[in-house]
Structures are given as C-alpha cells and as structure tokens.
Image (tube, rainbow, N blue to C red):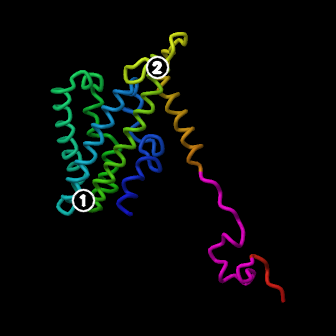
C-alpha cells in the first residue's frame, strides 16, 4: 500500500506542474503542441526513474559535501542518452524540444526528487516515486498542450478536431496563451480536488471518548 501511495501521489495530489508548480519552463515552452508535451514528458519520466534508481543505489556512498554535483552528473548522463536517442530516431521531436531537452538536467522536479526522496529511500519506492512524478508531469504537459493546440490550430496530435466554421485563436500557441491555459487548468483542478471541510461536533471529535460532556455516544451533554 505504501509503494502504491508513492506512485499515485505524483499523478494528482502532488502533481509537479499543476500542484507543486515545478518545471514551469518546459510546461510553458514546449506545450504549443500535444505531441511536444508527450515527448518532453516521457523523456523527463525516463530520466526521473533512472536517476532515482541510481541515486537510491548509491545513496550510502555519495558524500554529503558533493551530493548535489553527483546528482547532476548522474542526471546529465541519462539526459545525454535521451538526447542521442531522440536525435537518432525522432529528429523532428528533438528539434521541436530544442534546448529544453538538455535543460532536463537541471529540471527542479528531477533534482527535487533526488534530494528529497531518492537519496533517503530504498530502490523500489524511489523508482515508483520517479515513475509517478514523471507520469503526472507528462499528463499535465499533454493536457496543456492539447488545449493550446486545439484552441490555437484546431488540431490535437495533428488531427483536425475543430469544425471549419470556428476560427482558431493564434494567441493560444503564443507565450501569453500558455500562461492563460496553465492558469485555467490549475484553477479547475483546484476546484475539483478541493476538500470539503469536516463537520464540527461531538461525533467528529477524536477526544469524544474522554470528554465528560459526551454521554455514551449520544452526542448530548450528561445531566446530573
């Protein structure tokens, strides 16, 4: 159950982009198309999982004085591997992601999980943490990218979706549209996940058993 919690927390409850507001640069820069968001998200997920795995394995051997430089070297190695693979097999996606692909090395999501989780936990929880955070980041990029591509070009993943009589709004594929779309999605998510306040009363009080005013589970005050 604990391992499942480590995996699911990054999907919604602690979503890196929409809740913790991390990795804003790629979230805003590469989401002009849903395809770009998917590519960046999967690349980041791969680096997250692999770096968490290695850092967790080496956590007892990395000195505290050089902890951060070691993390960056490990992460940079996996980013280089991803860059080579994309250049070889998906050159158009690699060109679309541009410099933001290399900047995965210093992405605060990856460094944050390495510092806050992987270097303090065992391998399996660290892998699940990286996978959950990566998939949560990927989903947020796909959602933002889909909305911007649909509203800005009338397409999603290159397929025509919007009817011809509706004119696309170019502003959505511009930086201003990215900020507006991300803000709206964060607001909608906040409303959906908003917790209802707990009811106040004897029945909901954790100390009711020891309370003299609580009479045998009736919720009424004792009478003399």
Residue under the point 67% across and 78% down: 208
Q: In which quarter of the image is residue 204?
A: bottom right
> For mark 2, what is the residue?
161
Query: Which quarter of the figure is the N terminus placed in?
Result: bottom left
Residue at 33% from the left image edge and 53% from the top image edge: 129
Sooner in the amino-acid sequence: mark 1 or mark 2: 1
The reply to whether the magenta stretch includes residue 196 is yes
Figure quadrant of residue 101: top left
- What secondary structure is marked by label 2? loop
Give the answer, above or below, for where 66 lies relative to 29.
below
Q: Residue at x 36, y 32 (%)?
A: 26
Secondary structure mostly seen in magenta is loop
Q: Is residue 8 left or right of residue 186?
A: left
Most foreground residue, 168 or 99: 168
Residue 42 on the magenta segment: no
Q: Residue 123 carries which label?
A: 1
The circle drawn on residue 10 is: none
Where 17 falls versus 52 (above or below)? Answer: above
**Magenta highlight range:** 195-218
Q: Position of residue 83 (x, y in %)?
A: 20, 32
34 or 70: nearer the viewer: 34
Query: How many residues crowd mark 1 within 10 Å: few (<14), some (14–19), many (20+)?
Result: some
- x and y percent of residue 144 in the render? 45, 31
Q: In screen coordinates, is 219 left or right of 112?
A: right
Indicate left or right for 130 with 153 as reference: left
Cα distance between the residues tagged 1 and 2: 43 Å
Front-most of residues 69 and 111 = 111
Q: Indicate the position of residue 148 as horizontal and vertical percent values.
A: 46, 24
The C terminus, quarter of image? bottom right
Residue situated in front as seen by the camera: 147 or 117: 147
Q: Residue at x 48, y 15 (%)?
A: 170
């Amino acid at each position: 159950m604990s391992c499942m919690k480590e995996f699911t927390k990054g999907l919604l409850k602690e979503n890196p982009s929409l809740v913790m507001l991390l990795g804003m640069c790629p979230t805003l820069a590469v989401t002009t198309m849903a395809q770009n968001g998917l590519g960046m998200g999967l690349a980041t997920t791969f680096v997250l999982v692999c770096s968490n795995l290695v850092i967790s394995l080496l956590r007892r051997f990395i000195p505290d004085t050089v902890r951060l430089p070691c993390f960056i070297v490990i992460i940079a190695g996996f980013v280089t591997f991803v860059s080579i693979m994309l250049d070889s097999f998906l050159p158009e996606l690699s060109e679309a992601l541009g410099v933001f692909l290399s900047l995965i090395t210093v992405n605060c999501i990856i460094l944050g999980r390495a510092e806050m989780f992987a270097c303090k936990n065992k391998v399996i929880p660290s892998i699940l943490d990286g996978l959950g955070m990566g998939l949560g980041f990927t989903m947020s990029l796909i959602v933002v990218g889909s909305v911007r591509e649909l509203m800005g070009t009338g397409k999603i993943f290159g397929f025509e979706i919007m009817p011809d009589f509706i004119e696309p709004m170019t502003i959505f594929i511009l930086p201003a549209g990215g900020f507006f779309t991300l803000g709206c999605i964060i607001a909608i998510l906040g409303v959906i996940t908003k917790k209802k306040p707990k009811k106040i009363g004897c029945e909901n009080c954790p100390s009711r058993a020891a309370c003299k005013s609580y009479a045998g589970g009736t919720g009424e005050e004792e009478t003399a």
